[in-house]
Image (spheres, rainbow, N blue to C red):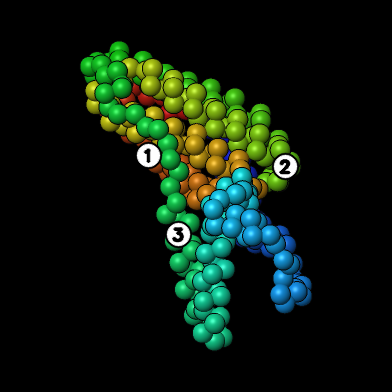
Amino acid sequence: MPRARLTSALFLAVVLIVGAMWFRFGKTDYTSSSITPINEHGPLFPDETFLGDFTGGERPTTTSSSLPLTQTDLFSRQLFSDYISLKSQGEITSSDANNIASKYAQNLFNISVPANKISINQITIVPDSQENLSLYGNAVSNLIRKYKNLTAPQYGGGSTADISSPAFATFMIAVSKSYQAAANELIALKAPASLAENHLNFVNLYLENAEIMKAVSNFSQDPVPAYSALNSYVQNTGKESGIILNIRVRLQASGIIFNNSL
């Protein structure tokens, strides 16, 4: 995957998250209530109408918004609730503000991205022969290079740096599909026994990254889970480097050296 350019695009999105959250929260329209005087005695109704209130009759129905609250909506409401609670106790100190900031920053990091992962039983494991190790190394190297080349042209800069643009969402969805396709190809590979666990981690990492990119693509509409997903992606980038290093070290131990993606 195009590491430097993809990560830079994601971090540009992070800069706008706080503004996006408060923009969404601040768009709520408020109207003042009004009091209408009523007749002290009220209108007179026939007995049948009066009794109908107790014996049945039609009841008014209520309607509610069909749009579910996003995680950002819930996050913003809770943040505002905490602020009001503190404000009701007096002036908010810098210590209070820092405590709230720390609390919500930690909550952001604790939001996980759900992903369907596979087990070791779904991987084809073969003996650690020189041939199998070489075939595996070539396959992984070609796969990494293939999807890097597929995704790189889609990064056009400019428009993809604007999280509210369709280009940004389209780019992230394309990256998500690339990760999913790469994971599917990894599942189809035959993994040498000594690299089976590492291979499993590789597959599941790409499956998770596919879901992460979907969340990031929705940054303008729901920035809270998108920011959490971005944090997970940064961590996964380091994990992927470790996984590839494990493959390289194992192959080198068998006298197999690659000068390309691995």
Sequence order check: which comes first, mark 1 or mark 3?
Answer: 3
Label 3 near label 2: C-beta < 8 Å?
A: no
Which three-letter amino acid code belongs to the residue tagged 1?
Answer: Gly
**What's the CA distance linking mark 1 and mark 2?**
34 Å
Q: Is residue 39 above or below residue 207?
A: below
**What's the CA distance linking mark 2 and mark 3?**
27 Å
Which three-letter amino acid code belongs to the residue tagged 3?
Answer: Asn
- Residues packed near mark 3 inside 10 Å, few (<14), some (14 to 19) or many (20 plus): few
The residue beneath circle 3 is 107
Which three-letter amino acid code belongs to the residue tagged 2?
Answer: Ser
Secondary structure at badge 3 equals helix
Sequence order check: which comes first, mark 2 or mark 3?
Answer: 3
Residue found at the far bottom of this picture:
90
**Place of residue 9 in the rendered image (x, y in percent of width and height, measured from the top left):** 63, 44
Q: Residue at x 52, y 79 (%)?
A: 86
**What's the CA distance linking mark 1 and mark 3?**
27 Å
Could you tell whether 90 is left or right of 33 in the image? Answer: left
**Place of residue 183 in the rendered image (x, y in percent of width and height, measured from the top left):** 44, 26
- Residues packed near mark 2 inside 10 Å, few (<14), some (14 to 19) or many (20 plus): few
The residue beneath circle 1 is 242
Sequence order check: which comes first, mark 1 or mark 2?
Answer: 2
Instruction: Name the image quarter holding residue 153.
Output: top right
